[in-house]
Amino acid sequence: MDVLGIFSAFGLSASAGLNAYIPLLVVALLARFTDLIKLKAPWDALASWWIIGILLFLSLIEFFADKFPAVNHVNDIIQSIVRPTAGAIVFAASANVLTDISPILSLACGLFVAGGVNAVKTFAIRPAVTATTAGAGNVPVSFLEDVLSTIVSVLSVILPILIVVLLIIVIGWWISRKESQRTRV
């Protein structure tokens, strides 16, 4: 089993928790135009022109829907189903390419990782940004999420160990922040 392949799959599925279509599009484009990813059946359908076109279209819809007040909250609720599903697909597709991990386990891991990132984004971070900035911070945060999702997706394929280190740092920071808040109360 390729450990770096697992790191890559985790990074891609975490990225899907921020934006469902960016990691799928990154995998599809890399599989179509490079030798970095060679998708096996049935995941090789991601590299077809039809799927790439659909992913581009859906990426544009999510990009713009996430930039308008009120629409972004409705979009986040709808995407709470789509993002974990995309995470499951991208984890299974990339794990199937890089490792011999079970497809069922791959789908479950991707669903869990993307669902967790999406839950933190949708039910903790975004409401806090809206409340503390009266909604003015939502557009910059949305741009940041899109950029972060793109960078994490690309780096997950090219430098998967870096993604693991970054995820550990972010999780450690978040846990220490929660602990310091708990001790202040």
Image (cartoon, helix red, strand yellow):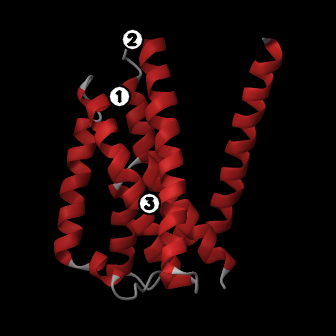
Indicate the position of residue 73 as horizontal and vertical percent values. Answer: 31, 29
Whether residues under marks 1 and 2 lie with C-beta atoms below 8 angstroms apart, the answer is: no
Given residues 183 and 45, the one toward you in this image is 183
Sooner in the amino-acid sequence: mark 1 or mark 3: 3
Amino acid type, callout 2: Ala
Numbered tag placed on residue 88 in the rendering: none
Q: Distance from label 1 to label 2 (Cα)?
A: 12 Å
Residue drawn at (54%, 81%) of the image: 102
- Label 1: state its secondary structure: helix
Q: Distance from label 1 to label 3 (Cα)?
A: 23 Å
- Label 3: state its secondary structure: helix
In this rendering, is residue 59 above or below 55? above
Q: Which quadrant of the figure has residue 143? A: top left
Q: In which quadrant will I find the C terminus?
A: top right
Tell me if 70 is positioned left or right of 27 in this view: left
Tell me if 75 is positioned left or right of 80 in this view: left
Residue that label 3 marks: 87
Number of residues whose C-alpha sits closer than 10 Å to that of mark 3, classed few (under 14), some (14–19) or many (20 or more): many
Numbered tag placed on residue 134 in the rendering: 2
Number of residues whose C-alpha sits closer than 10 Å to that of mark 1, classed few (under 14), some (14–19) or many (20 or more): some
Residue drawn at (37%, 44%) of the image: 80
Indicate the position of residue 138 as horizontal and vertical percent values. Answer: 38, 25
